[in-house]
């Protein structure tokens, strides 16, 4: 063995360690960039408004629950949480009931133009629809009801469901359904008993993402809701006024809005990854 070979073999572990360290540093930096705003929001929720804008209280401060008392007692955020939950669950369930069969038909009959047409709904700015929607719903005298909010949120959730599920169904072998139909099943029975159980990861992904998109929607609820049906993203504006901003209450309200979404994302991340990558490979 030559001296050059020995030297090269000694350098290889060193380069591997350096690469591993650099990779770890990169991951730590990216994680810090994403986590720091959340940590700052969480700490600010337990500070007074003066402590939030004072740099000397960045780390050392006495936690207070006054902001959360303002959120739930003064601003009555409990009702807004119920409103957001009703709208998000309702729009998600309807989008699944209509979107999953539509995605199956698009995938099995290879109607690519339909997918493009449905995804156009994600491109159209929502603000361009608010004026005709408000005029129509006001004529029907249903502005401010849960039904209006659920109906408009379907415009956001259904294209998402169809886009995810059509790719998922395309990744499932069609021979499985053909075997079931040879055994006497109709196409509907094969879909319900064979294809639908196999598509649980995709359905879970569609459900989670649709719920999150509906939960965070601000524009539609801002125009089409009233005091009784107001959702959380709209209610958070109660902490801002022309003259001042209640930063403590605003951060506490932001925690209330963000916490359910973070919990759902934390426990369901493996379904999201499985569902989004299932249609990437076929065969």
Image (cartoon, helix red, strand yellow):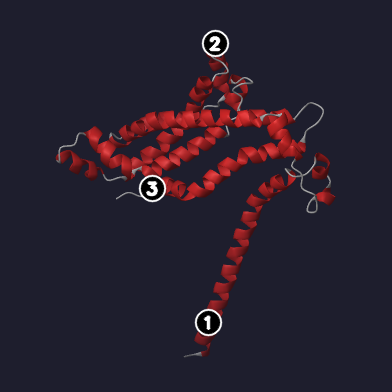
As drawn, is 251 to the left or to the right of 258? right
Q: Residues within 10 Å of mark 1 (few under 14, many from 20)?
A: few
> Which secondary structure, mark 3?
loop
Which residue is identified by label 1? 8
Residue most extreme to the top: 139
Q: Which residue is mark 2?
A: 141
- Report which residue position mark 3 lands on: 278
Q: CA distance from mark 1 to mark 3?
A: 42 Å
Q: Are marks 1 and 3 in contact (CB under 8 Å)?
A: no
**Front: mark 1 or 3:** 3
| In the rendered image, the vertical position of residue 20 relative to residue 6, given as above or below | above
Q: Upstream in the sequence, badge 1 or badge 3?
A: 1
**Of 275 and 81, the residue lying toward us:** 81
Mark 3 vs mark 2: give the one in front. Answer: 2
Residue situated in front as seen by the camera: 124 or 80: 80
Q: Is residue 216 left or right of residue 173?
A: right
Alpha-carbon distance for marks 1 and 2?
Answer: 79 Å
Residue pictured at 68% horizontal, 47% vertical:
37
**Which quarter of the picture shows residue 207?**
top left
Instruction: Please provide percent x and percent y for residue 133.
Output: 53, 17
Q: Does residue 119 appear anywhere in the picture? A: no
Assign a secondary structure to mark 1: helix
């Amino acid at each position: 063995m030559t001296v050059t070979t020995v030297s090269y073999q000694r350098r290889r572990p060193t380069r591997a360690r350096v690469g591993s360290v650099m990779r770890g540093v990169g991951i730590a930096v990216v994680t810090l960039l994403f986590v720091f705003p959340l940590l700052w929001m969480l700490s600010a929720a337990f500070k007074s408004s003066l402590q939030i804008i004072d740099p000397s209280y960045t780390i050392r401060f006495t936690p207070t629950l006054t902001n959360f008392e303002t959120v739930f007692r003064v601003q009555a955020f409990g009702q807004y949480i119920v409103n957001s939950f009703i709208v998000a669950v309702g729009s998600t369930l309807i989008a699944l009931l209509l979107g999953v069969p539509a995605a199956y038909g698009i995938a099995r009959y290879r109607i690519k133009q339909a997918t493009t047409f449905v995804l156009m709904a994600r491109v159209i700015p929502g603000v361009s629809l608010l004026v005709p929607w408000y005029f129509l719903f006001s004529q029907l005298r249903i502005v401010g009801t849960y039904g209006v909010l659920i109906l408009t949120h379907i415009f956001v959730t259904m294209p998402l469901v169809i886009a995810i599920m059509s790719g998922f169904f395309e990744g499932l072998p069609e021979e499985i359904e053909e075997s079931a139909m040879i055994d006497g099943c109709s196409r509907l029975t094969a879909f319900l008993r064979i294809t639908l159980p196999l598509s649980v990861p995709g359905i879970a992904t569609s459900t989670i993402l649709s719920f999150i998109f509906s939960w965070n929607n601000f524009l539609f609820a801002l125009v089409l809701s009233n005091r009784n049906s107001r959702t959380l993203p709209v209610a958070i504006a109660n902490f801002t006024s022309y003259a001042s901003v209640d930063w403590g209450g605003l951060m506490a309200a932001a925690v209330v809005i963000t916490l359910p979404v973070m919990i759902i994302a934390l426990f369901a991340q493996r379904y999201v990854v499985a569902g989004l990558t299932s249609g990437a490979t076929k065969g």
